[in-house]
Amino acid sequence: MHCAPSISDRPRLASSFILSLVAGLLSISAWAQAESDQRDADELDSGVAYNIEVIADDLDYPWSLGFLPNGDLLVTERTGQLRLIRDGQLLAEPVAGVPDVFASSQGGLMGLLIDPEFEQNQTIYLSLAHGTAEANATRVVRARLNERALSDVEILFTAEPTKDTPVHYGGRMTWLGDGTMVIGLGDGFDYREQAQRLDTHFGSIVRINPDGSIPPDNPFIGQADALPEIHSYGHRNIQGLVFDAETGTLWQHEHGPRGGDELNRIEPAQNYGWPVATHGIDYSGALISPYESRPDMVDPLWVWTPSIAPSGMTLYRGGEFPEWNGDLLVTALVSRNVRRMDLEDGEVVREDTLFDDIGQRLRDIRTAPDGSIYLLTDSSEGQLLRVTASR
């Protein structure tokens, strides 16, 4: 991962390829030019006035949040706790019954997804790092939330094979329009070449039913040497997944290495290129691949170079900020702001920067039922922030 050094985002720097000094210098030059171009884009701003209030603080590396029908909010903390916010107050005791997690470096309790029928079944879904330092993987469980405790915890999915790195788990989840669930996964950092293989889950998006079974129309069902859960592949470290029910579009973003963060429009069975095609370079400055685009691989819709470390994403639809309706809002860890991706006919026509004044690493963003925007800051003293329009 390419974020500024912190205890939550500090991968082991390694390079799988030994390339010539000339190639490295050329790639650095290209990266520097792209950085200059990106600075010009960063000067844009939406001009919309807003207010920010702190709803909760002293959260321990909050990672994801969700809204319950009764107005309560749930927040996952990477260190393993699930927190409940009621009537604008963070309850002192975490929700009981959360499964044990492998909390190390980027691993821990991560994604949160609320069942669309929560009022009837009280079901939530959690993604987490499971295992040990020598053998760990991304896992998804579902459970019933009974007031302040989880019960009936079931394992729905565990990525294969296990890995011995505490980084690049992915962990974001979302619902598709047909009621199936997609889960974004990472390449494990040291296993990036396996993102091009269909017999591992590294660097893929997987699609399952709410009970963990495999939809019969998954694209690689019946294909030899292909895992049947895989929906798309060739990804590095997926950190944002949003489904637009109005257009039927699945949006995704992922971390590049040094540069090359990507926004993608996801289609089943497609190969998104990593690490064969990338706009980024290695942490050492060496070239990862000479290709930014390859035949039979899908090019990103948008590229951030230098890296902003996109971390969460919401598709905004609401009355609080009508100027942003239908646009993607992306939180960033390194640039410490939100990027508004202005969409027209499924294409990005403009990028604005929002909420620079917060000045903190931002981990997640969600649109509330009332149209306000909620943000999580990435810190051992993390905050839940609510953004409303100034009128």
Image (spheres, rainbow, N blue to C red):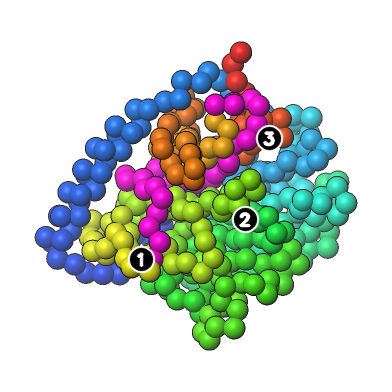
- Element type at mark 2: strand
Q: Which amino acid does label 2 sit on?
A: Met
Residue 148 in sight here = yes
Depth order, front residue of 3/102: 3
What stretch of residues is rendered in magenta? 297-323
Residue at which label 2 appears: 173
- Element type at mark 3: loop
Q: Is residue 319 above or below residue 380?
A: above
Q: Local crowd at mark 3 within 10 Å, few (<14), some, or many (≥20)?
A: some
Q: Which of marks 3 and 1 is nearer the N terminus?
A: 1
State the image coordinates of residue 391 (x, y, percent, origin top left): 61, 13
For image coordinates 59% across by 26% down, the residue present is 321
For image coordinates 20% across by 55% down, the residue present is 27
Residue at which label 1 appears: 275
State the image coordinates of residue 261 (x, y, percent, origin top left): 39, 50
Depth order, front residue of 181/350: 350
State the image coordinates of residue 316 (x, y, percent, origin top left): 59, 36
- Element type at mark 1: loop
368 magenta-colored: no
- Number of labels in the image equals 3
